[in-house]
Image (cartoon, helix red, strand yellow):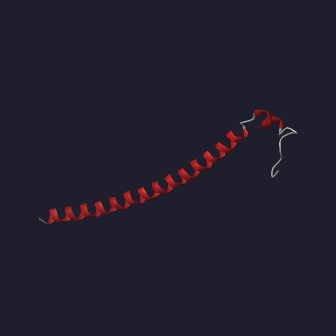
C-alpha cells in the first residue's frame, strides 16, 4: 500500500511538471506566432508598395515624365 501511495505521489509531481512545461511551451509558441504574423503583415505591405511602383515600369526605371504631376499637385 505504501508503494502504491508513493508511486501516486510521484506520478502527481510528474503530471504537474509536465503541465507547467506544456503551458510554457504553448505560451512561447503563441508569442512566436504573433511575431510571425506581424512580420507577415509588414512584408505584405512592402510587397503592395513595390507592386504599386511597378505598375508603370518606365516610371520605375526613369522616373515620372515631364507631363505627370508631382506629389501634392
Q: Nearer the viewer, residue 66 or 62?
A: 66
Q: Residue furthest top?
A: 58
Looking at the figure, which quarter contains the N terminus? Answer: bottom left
The image shows a total of numbered marks equal to 0
Residue at 33 percent of width and 60 percent of height: 19
> Residue 3 is drawn in which quadrant?
bottom left
Residue 14: x %, y % from top left: 29, 60
Q: Is residue 62 above or below residue 36?
A: above
> Residue 52 is drawn in which quadrant?
top right
Residue 68: x %, y % from top left: 83, 41
Q: In the picture provided, is 12 more to the left or to the right than 37?
A: left
Q: Nearer the viewer, residue 12 or 28?
A: 28
Residue at 81 percent of width and 50 percent of height: 71
Q: In the picture provided, is 26 more to the left or to the right than 52?
A: left
Residue 57: x %, y % from top left: 76, 33
Q: Nearer the viewer, residue 73 or 56?
A: 73
Q: Residue furthest left?
A: 1
Q: Is residue 30 above or below residue 68?
A: below
Q: In the picture provided, is 65 more to the left or to the right than 1?
A: right
Q: Residue furthest right?
A: 66
> Residue 7 is drawn in which quadrant?
bottom left
Q: In the picture provided, is 57 more to the left or to the right than 18?
A: right
Residue 46: x %, y % from top left: 66, 46
Residue at 46 percent of width and 57 percent of height: 28
Residue at 20 percent of width and 65 percent of height: 6
Amino acid at each position: 500500500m505504501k508503494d502504491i501511495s508513493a508511486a501516486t505521489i510521484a506520478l502527481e509531481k510528474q503530471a504537474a511538471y509536465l503541465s507547467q512545461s506544456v503551458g510554457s511551451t504553448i505560451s512561447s509558441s503563441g508569442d512566436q506566432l504573433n511575431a510571425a504574423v506581424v512580420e507577415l503583415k509588414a512584408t505584405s505591405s512592402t510587397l503592395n508598395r513595390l507592386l504599386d511602383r511597378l505598375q508603370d515600369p518606365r516610371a520605375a526605371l526613369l522616373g515620372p515624365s515631364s507631363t505627370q504631376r508631382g506629389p501634392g499637385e
